[in-house]
Amino acid sequence: MITTIYDTDIPDEHLTIMGKIFLNWSLLEFILTRIVSSLLSIDYKTGRIITRSMNSATKIDKIRSLVKHKNIGSLNRLEEVITKLNSAREKRNDIAHGVWTQDDNNNYYIIKYSSRNQQNPIKKKMSIDELNLIYTEVTSALAELKVWEDNLSASKI
Protein backbone atom coordinates (compact mmCIF):
# COMPACT_ATOMS: atom_id res chain seq x y z
CA MET A 1 0.00 0.00 0.00
CA ILE A 2 1.25 3.48 -0.89
CA THR A 3 0.53 6.36 1.44
CA THR A 4 1.18 10.07 1.07
CA ILE A 5 3.72 11.33 3.59
CA TYR A 6 4.57 14.66 5.09
CA ASP A 7 7.97 16.30 5.56
CA THR A 8 8.38 14.97 9.09
CA ASP A 9 8.04 11.43 7.76
CA ILE A 10 10.90 11.70 5.26
CA PRO A 11 14.21 10.45 6.73
CA ASP A 12 16.88 13.02 7.51
CA GLU A 13 19.25 11.43 4.99
CA HIS A 14 16.74 12.11 2.20
CA LEU A 15 16.13 15.65 3.44
CA THR A 16 19.86 16.42 3.61
CA ILE A 17 20.47 15.42 0.00
CA MET A 18 17.33 17.26 -1.12
CA GLY A 19 18.62 20.37 0.64
CA LYS A 20 21.94 20.11 -1.21
CA ILE A 21 20.09 19.74 -4.52
CA PHE A 22 17.95 22.82 -3.80
CA LEU A 23 20.91 24.92 -2.63
CA ASN A 24 22.88 24.13 -5.78
CA TRP A 25 19.81 24.81 -7.90
CA SER A 26 19.50 28.26 -6.30
CA LEU A 27 23.10 28.98 -7.26
CA LEU A 28 22.41 27.72 -10.77
CA GLU A 29 19.44 30.11 -11.08
CA PHE A 30 21.66 32.94 -9.80
CA ILE A 31 24.21 32.21 -12.54
CA LEU A 32 21.47 32.05 -15.19
CA THR A 33 20.35 35.55 -14.14
CA ARG A 34 23.95 36.79 -14.26
CA ILE A 35 24.33 35.41 -17.78
CA VAL A 36 21.10 37.05 -18.97
CA SER A 37 22.28 40.32 -17.43
CA SER A 38 25.67 40.03 -19.10
CA LEU A 39 24.16 39.24 -22.50
CA LEU A 40 21.87 42.27 -22.17
CA SER A 41 24.82 44.44 -21.01
CA ILE A 42 22.99 45.45 -17.84
CA ASP A 43 23.90 45.23 -14.18
CA TYR A 44 22.81 42.20 -12.15
CA LYS A 45 20.23 44.09 -10.08
CA THR A 46 18.46 45.28 -13.23
CA GLY A 47 18.75 41.75 -14.61
CA ARG A 48 17.01 40.41 -11.50
CA ILE A 49 14.15 42.84 -12.03
CA ILE A 50 13.77 41.69 -15.64
CA THR A 51 14.04 37.95 -14.86
CA ARG A 52 12.12 37.96 -11.55
CA SER A 53 9.10 36.07 -12.85
CA MET A 54 11.10 33.74 -15.12
CA ASN A 55 11.67 30.14 -14.16
CA SER A 56 14.91 28.41 -15.10
CA ALA A 57 13.48 27.02 -18.37
CA THR A 58 12.54 30.53 -19.50
CA LYS A 59 15.96 31.93 -18.53
CA ILE A 60 17.66 29.13 -20.46
CA ASP A 61 15.50 29.88 -23.50
CA LYS A 62 16.34 33.61 -23.25
CA ILE A 63 20.05 32.85 -23.02
CA ARG A 64 19.85 30.65 -26.12
CA SER A 65 17.94 33.37 -28.02
CA LEU A 66 20.33 36.14 -26.95
CA VAL A 67 23.40 34.11 -27.94
CA LYS A 68 21.86 33.44 -31.36
CA HIS A 69 20.81 37.07 -31.76
CA LYS A 70 24.24 38.40 -30.81
CA ASN A 71 25.96 35.69 -32.85
CA ILE A 72 28.25 34.87 -29.95
CA GLY A 73 30.53 31.98 -30.84
CA SER A 74 29.48 28.43 -31.46
CA LEU A 75 26.11 27.31 -30.18
CA ASN A 76 27.26 23.69 -29.93
CA ARG A 77 28.84 24.06 -26.48
CA LEU A 78 25.90 26.07 -25.17
CA GLU A 79 23.49 23.42 -26.43
CA GLU A 80 25.49 20.72 -24.61
CA VAL A 81 25.25 22.72 -21.37
CA ILE A 82 21.54 23.39 -21.92
CA THR A 83 20.88 19.67 -22.47
CA LYS A 84 22.48 18.91 -19.10
CA LEU A 85 20.64 21.78 -17.42
CA ASN A 86 17.28 20.62 -18.75
CA SER A 87 17.85 17.05 -17.61
CA ALA A 88 18.86 18.22 -14.13
CA ARG A 89 15.93 20.69 -14.04
CA GLU A 90 13.39 17.99 -14.78
CA LYS A 91 14.71 15.76 -12.00
CA ARG A 92 14.97 18.64 -9.55
CA ASN A 93 11.38 19.60 -10.36
CA ASP A 94 10.22 16.05 -9.67
CA ILE A 95 11.74 16.20 -6.19
CA ALA A 96 10.51 19.71 -5.45
CA HIS A 97 7.01 19.42 -6.89
CA GLY A 98 6.20 15.73 -6.74
CA VAL A 99 4.08 14.15 -4.04
CA TRP A 100 6.24 12.03 -1.74
CA THR A 101 4.89 8.59 -0.88
CA GLN A 102 6.09 5.58 1.03
CA ASP A 103 5.22 1.89 0.72
CA ASP A 104 5.00 -0.72 3.47
CA ASN A 105 8.67 -1.65 2.92
CA ASN A 106 9.88 1.91 3.62
CA ASN A 107 10.66 2.61 -0.02
CA TYR A 108 10.14 6.24 -0.98
CA TYR A 109 8.57 7.40 -4.23
CA ILE A 110 7.66 10.58 -6.03
CA ILE A 111 4.21 10.65 -7.57
CA LYS A 112 3.98 13.10 -10.43
CA TYR A 113 0.58 14.01 -11.77
CA SER A 114 0.56 14.97 -15.42
CA SER A 115 -1.94 17.53 -16.63
CA ARG A 116 -2.37 15.33 -19.71
CA ASN A 117 -3.04 12.11 -17.81
CA GLN A 118 -4.55 12.71 -14.37
CA GLN A 119 -5.76 9.11 -14.08
CA ASN A 120 -2.31 7.48 -14.33
CA PRO A 121 0.30 9.42 -12.37
CA ILE A 122 3.98 8.68 -12.88
CA LYS A 123 5.61 6.94 -9.91
CA LYS A 124 9.40 7.11 -9.48
CA LYS A 125 11.35 5.36 -6.75
CA MET A 126 13.44 7.87 -4.82
CA SER A 127 16.15 6.04 -2.89
CA ILE A 128 19.20 7.68 -1.34
CA ASP A 129 21.22 6.42 -4.31
CA GLU A 130 18.78 8.02 -6.77
CA LEU A 131 18.88 11.32 -4.87
CA ASN A 132 22.69 11.22 -4.87
CA LEU A 133 22.68 10.70 -8.65
CA ILE A 134 20.39 13.72 -9.05
CA TYR A 135 22.64 15.75 -6.74
CA THR A 136 25.64 14.79 -8.87
CA GLU A 137 23.78 15.73 -12.06
CA VAL A 138 22.72 19.13 -10.69
CA THR A 139 26.25 19.81 -9.41
CA SER A 140 27.76 18.83 -12.77
CA ALA A 141 25.30 21.04 -14.68
CA LEU A 142 26.11 23.90 -12.32
CA ALA A 143 29.86 23.47 -12.87
CA GLU A 144 29.46 23.39 -16.66
CA LEU A 145 27.24 26.46 -16.61
CA LYS A 146 29.84 28.30 -14.52
CA VAL A 147 32.59 27.40 -17.01
CA TRP A 148 30.39 28.62 -19.87
CA GLU A 149 29.73 31.87 -17.98
CA ASP A 150 33.46 32.34 -17.28
CA ASN A 151 34.25 31.82 -20.96
CA LEU A 152 31.54 34.30 -21.92
CA SER A 153 33.00 36.88 -19.52
CA ALA A 154 36.47 36.29 -20.92
CA SER A 155 35.07 36.46 -24.48
CA LYS A 156 36.26 32.93 -25.19
CA ILE A 157 32.93 31.90 -26.62
Image (tube, rainbow, N blue to C red):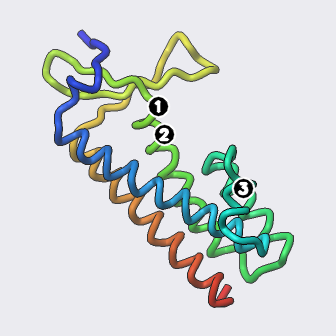
Relative to 99, residue 93 above or below: below
Q: Amino acid under label 3?
A: Asp
Q: Depth check: give the residue in front, 107 or 58.
A: 58
Q: Amino acid under label 2?
A: Asn
Q: Residue at x 61, y 50 (%)?
A: 56
Q: Amino acid under label 1?
A: His
Q: Choose the circle earlier in sequence order: 1 or 3.
A: 3
Label 3: state its secondary structure.
Answer: helix
Q: Residues within 10 Å of mark 1 (few under 14, many from 20)?
A: few
Q: Depth check: give the residue in front, 157 or 150.
A: 150
Relative to 60, residue 153 above or below: below
Q: CA distance from mark 1 to mark 3?
A: 21 Å
Q: Position of residue 124 (x, y in %)?
A: 36, 31
Q: Position of residue 141 (x, y in %)?
A: 47, 63
Label 1: state its secondary structure.
Answer: helix
Left or right of 54? Residue 148 is: left
For the image, the number of numbered tags is 3
Q: Choose the circle earlier in sequence order: 3 or 2.
A: 3
Q: Which mark is residue 93?
A: 2
Q: Position of residue 24 (x, y in %)?
A: 40, 57
Image quarter where the N terminus lies is top left
Q: Which mark is residue 97?
A: 1
Image quarter where the C terminus lies is bottom right
Residue tagged by mark 3?
A: 61
Left or right of 65? Residue 84 is: left
Q: Position of residue 47 (x, y in %)?
A: 71, 62
Mark 2 touching mark 1, by CB under 8 A? Answer: yes
Q: Residue at x 20, y 23 (%)?
A: 9
Q: Residue at x 17, y 33 (%)?
A: 11
State which quadrant residue 13 falls in.
top left
